[in-house]
Amino acid sequence: MDTLIQSIYQLFGVNSKEQFADLVSAKGHQEIIRQHRADLIASRIFPFAVLFGIVVPAWGILDLIYFPTEIALTFVAMRLASGGAFFILAYITKKVRIGMKRALTSLMVMLMIPTLFYQLSTPLIASAELTGMATTLMSLYGLLPYVVIASLALFPLTLKEFSLFSLVLVILSGIGLYRSEGSDLNMLLAQLWLLLVILGVSMFSSLQQVRYLISQMVKASYDGLTKLLTRRAGMDIMESLFRATGLQQSNFSVLFLDLDKFKGINDTLGHDAGDEVLRQTAKTLSESIRRGDAAIRWGGEEFLILLPHTDSESAKNVVSRLMNRGLATLPDGTPVTASIGLSEQHEDNTHSWKDLVDIADKRLYHAKQTGRAKCVAPDGSEVHFPAQNARVKAN
Ligand SMILES: Nc1nc2c(ncn2[C@@H]2O[C@H](COP(=O)(O)OP(=O)(O)OP(=O)(O)O)[C@@H](O)[C@H]2O)c(=O)[nH]1
């Protein structure tokens, strides 16, 4: 059984259950991965939408030349409608940060346009007596379902998403194929078989793109020492959290932490001991927050914790939890503390993440100036490290 699982992991280029789960569903994806995947999907839809917006109506000229007038005019009308839909799609996906839901909906619309076109064109073509070039054009229409399914390979989709997309497309294409090949069962089965083979290859390519995207994002977005998000990645997340509709109405708290007397630790115990303290602190921070929150290494010994949908009272609970647990200890058992500034978007009446971080930074500074090892909240109240975790290492 283990060998089978290992072979499956190997086939998909993953090393663990968690990595495999990330290919199956987007549920466990970090916000930063979600965001980049949405950006990538949108950026791939855009050029195709523009191209098809031009080529699909322009192709109508060939219809007018080679098909009987009545059929040709219906095709031209369908082509103009499709071209318009492609241009609307291009307009939607041109914007940056459209979000995952909109990116997936746009992709579904982009795939549905040719699929519906195929559905509508099949009975039209079937009813006509076609010869010469018109027969060649007709066989090109017959390729549409394969092209649509193969195009899924261009997009980084999880297995769940891919299955949903392909189920809709296979059912609709199957109906279209049945209409055109219904009388010949062998032909119909052969066509469906080809469709499934293309589907398998597309699925593999799509999943590999998700895997590659995640591995690149993890490399680029996580700090090598602490494995927390880098400042750059953290800024990206805050930017998108602030844009997210819904969050404006909701609470959003930020904790800004700076380790106390950290220079003294480096100076007396060495840089490696300092690094170990940073690693322990990062582990404590990431283990003390919920999924959906984010821990960022903002600078050398500075950390940010983002707490979406959290008011300052609940944020103070997070702080107490951290303080009671203890951030890290030195080899001689001395606890390491931090000074913390807490800000919250409604209480601080801020409209940008930069203001929220600045205010948290000012409160952190105040905490440093007034004794360290504590957190200063928006109402001026303070949360202190418990005595057993509060000995500030002197430098
Ligand atoms: N070991 C280690 N040290 C770092 C790293 N990044 C920054 N530092 C050190 O962190 C120290 C920060 O010290 P200061 O900003 O002077 O403040 P502090 O000693 O923590 O004192 P207070 O903040 O006033 O409590 C500097 O000595 C930096 O060299 C790192 O990745 N590893």
Image (cartoon, grey):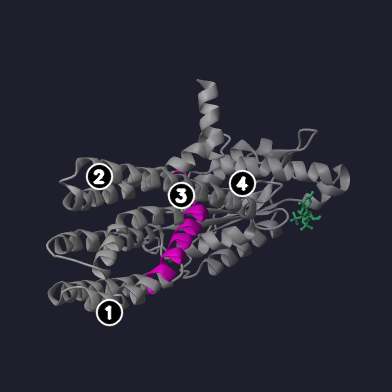
> Between residues 255 and 217, which one lies in front from this camera angle?
217
Provide residue 282's location: percent of width, then percent of height. Answer: 65, 44
Q: Secondary structure at mark 1?
A: helix
Residue at the (35%, 45%) spot, across then down: 194
**Label 1, label 4: how far apart the Cα atoms are:** 76 Å
Judge depth for marks 2 and 3 and give the one in front: 2
Judge depth for marks 2 and 1 and give the one in front: 2
Provide residue 229's location: percent of width, then percent of height. Answer: 61, 52
- The single residue placed furthest to the top in the displayed view is 1
> Between residues 206 and 395, which one lies in front from this camera angle?
206
Provide residue 238's location: percent of width, then percent of height. Answer: 52, 61
Residue marked by disc 2: 187
User: Which of the two labelled residues, at mark 4 and mark 3, occupies the earlier sequence position?
Assistant: 3
| Residue 255 appears left or right of 64 | right
Dot 1: within a 10 Å radius of its alpha carbon, few (fewer than 14), some, or many (20 or more) residues?
few
Residue marked by disc 1: 61
**Label 2, label 1: how far apart the Cα atoms are:** 31 Å
- Badge 4 vs badge 3, beta-carbon distance below 8 Å: no
Q: Secondary structure at mark 4?
A: strand
Q: Secondary structure at mark 3?
A: helix
User: Which of the two labelled residues, at mark 2 and mark 4, occupies the earlier sequence position?
Assistant: 2
* Residue 345 seen in the current view: no
Q: Which mark is residue 206?
A: 3
Residue marked by disc 4: 384
| Residue kind at label 1, given as amino acid type | Ile
Locate residue 190: give its quadrant.
top left
| Residue kind at label 2, given as amino acid type | Met
> Between residues 258 and 6, which one lies in front from this camera angle?
6
Q: Is residue 72 magenta?
A: no
**Which stretch is magenta?**
28-50
Q: Which mark is residue 139?
A: none
User: Which of the two labelled residues, at mark 2 and mark 1, occupies the earlier sequence position?
Assistant: 1
